[in-house]
Amino acid sequence: MSALRLLITAGAVFYVMVFLVQIAQNGSVTGQALAGVILLAVAATLTWMHDELALKRYETALLWVMVLGFLAYAVANASGVLA
């Protein structure tokens, strides 16, 4: 399991770097990139937890935050709030 944790952490670090490059190239995506960095940090941190019950609760909560975020985006896009 240790190799899997390291791979997830390495992947999160890679994508954080991608987000930072995107911010440097296009400042208008700063908010979205920072949200992505926060979600990646939380997801990578969860893999290092040892309490299985707390881990399950946090993973479920994070999953619902992402699902509801996509739903809010879709509703805002469909209603014309986002162009």
Image (cartoon, rainbow, N blue to C red):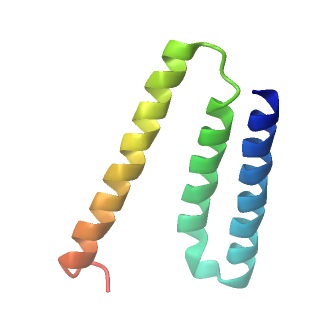
Residue 70: which quarter of the image? bottom left
Q: Is residue 10 above or below residue 82?
A: above
Residue 71: which quarter of the image? bottom left
Residue at image coords 81%, 38%: 6
Total marks placed = 0
> Is 26 situated left or right of 53 in this image?
right
In the picture, the quarter occupied by the C terminus is: bottom left
Toward the viewer: 8 or 62? 8
Q: Residue furthest left?
A: 79
Q: Is residue 76 above or below residue 41?
A: below
Residue at image coords 66%, 21%: 49
In the picture, the quarter occupied by the N terminus is: top right
> Is 12 situated left or right of 52 in this image?
right
> Is 73 situated left or right of 63 in this image?
left
**Residue 81 screen position, x and y as percent:** 25, 78
Residue at image coords 75%, 36%: 4
> Is 19 situated left or right of 34 in this image?
right
Residue 55: which quarter of the image? top right
Residue at image coords 54%, 66%: 31
Q: Is residue 38 above or below residue 31?
A: above
Q: Residue furthest bottom?
A: 83
**Residue 51 screen position, x and y as percent:** 60, 13
**Residue 58 screen position, x and y as percent:** 48, 28
